[in-house]
Amino acid sequence: MIDRPMPAPLRRRVAPAAAALSLIAVAAAAGVSCALAAEPGVDQLLQTALAAKADPKHGHVQFDRHCARCHGAGGRGDVNHRVPVLAGQRRAYLVRQLAALSGDQRESANMHRALSVAELHDPQTWADVAAYLEAAPLPPHPRTGDGRALGLGEATFHVECASCHHDDARGDDDGLIPSLRNQHYLYLLSQMRRLAELHRHDMDENIARLLRSLKPDEASAVADYLSRLRGRARDDPPTRDAPP
Ligand code: HEC
Ligand code: HEC
């Protein structure tokens, strides 16, 4: 937890951030999914996929055939090309991203091409692949940042991000807010920038604004702090890589 005075820039942002979050709390209490105003198509596909009985063995076969060349064996990601770790990520979040990436709700030329294969248009296949990935062994060494500003990263995370992603960054229990553990530093940082630019078209503008308000040193510090959090999202308390 935070054991030092909060840096001045964080103090200045607390009030607006708290106001935005109280709106979100109201939305959450009313049963509205936190911060998502999804296009009906994506939500419908998500519901269909989540209702399917998933077959992780079939998911494993499909993953090895269509995905591993970029995402690495077992979904450990590719640090040099900003390809995310998928192992251990929440199943519902993975399915939702596949639904968004198979249409035009989230930009990514690589993923649009990868999902253009006919057999990957099927929500059942997304459910199978996501079930395989959620349970896949965690990658041993996601790449971290330089470790120079971890106090700032931790403080920024707890003030600005933990209300949605949870104090231990495991994501929400419904599974639509992603775990931010076990993820490569460069991917986290590049997604924070891209989310700020609304490359996911159904993202809540408040989250994009929050991410835009981070100074470059705060953004890299949060990504570095997060890239050191380990542990499976649902049950384990996280462990942390030591600073260099
Ligand atoms: C040509 C390389 C390539 C292939 C093949 C590929 N991916 Fe991706 N994938 C990427 C990249 C790059 C991203 C990051 C996109 C971005 O920057 O927003 C990504 C993002 C994702 C995400 C979003 C992860 C997150 O944390 O939001 C999911 C889920 C995903 N891929 C699943 C798959 C699956 C399943 C397959 C196989 C059916 C696959 N990918 C095949 C390159 C690829
Ligand atoms: C109001 C809730 C909320 C807050 C506050 C919030 N996020 Fe998120 N975040 C989300 C949701 C929801 C998504 C998933 C969006 C989607 O479905 O594409 C997300 C996605 C992300 C992703 C993409 C993960 C991936 O695997 O691609 C990153 C990185 C991220 N958030 C970092 C942050 C950081 C850092 C902060 C604080 C500075 C933050 N978020 C604050 C709700 C929030």
Image (cartoon, rainbow, N blue to C red):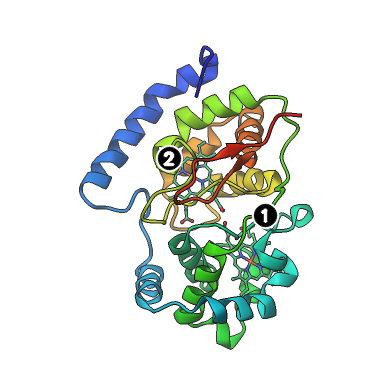
**Residue that extends furthest to the top in the rendered view of this protein:** 5
Residue 149, disc: none
Residue 166, disc: 2
Q: Nearer the viewer, residue 64 or 119?
A: 64
**Residue that extends furthest to the front in the rendered view of this protein:** 236
1 or 2: tag closer to the N-terminus: 1
Is 118 situated above or below 68?
Answer: below
Secondary structure under the numbered disc 1 in the rendered image:
loop
Q: Residue tagged by mark 1?
A: 139
The spot of residue 87 in percent (x, y) is: 60, 60
Residue ID at (64%, 31%)? 221
Q: Are marks 1 and 2 in contact (CB under 8 Å)?
A: no
> What is the crowding at mark 1: few (fewer than 14 residues within 10 Å), some, or many (at least 20)?
some
Q: Where is the C terminus found, in terms of image quarters?
A: top right
> What is the crowding at mark 2: few (fewer than 14 residues within 10 Å), some, or many (at least 20)?
some
Ligand number 1: quarter of image: bottom right
Residue type marked 1: Pro
- In front of the other: label 1 or label 2? 1
Is 151 situated above or below 61?
Answer: above
Is 192 situated above or below 8?
Answer: below
Secondary structure under the numbered disc 2 in the rendered image:
loop
The spot of residue 142 in percent (x, y) is: 70, 48
Q: Nearer the viewer, residue 242 or 124?
A: 242
Specify the quadrant of the image occupied by residue 107. Answer: bottom right
Residue ID at (54%, 68%)? 101
Residue ID at (34%, 49%)? 34
Left/right of residue 199 with respect to residue 34 in the rendered view: right
Residue ID at (60%, 34%)? 222
Is 158 situated above or below 75?
Answer: above
The spot of residue 174 in percent (x, y) is: 36, 55
Left/right of residue 147 with respect to residue 215 in the rendered view: right
Q: CA distance from mark 1 to mark 2?
A: 21 Å
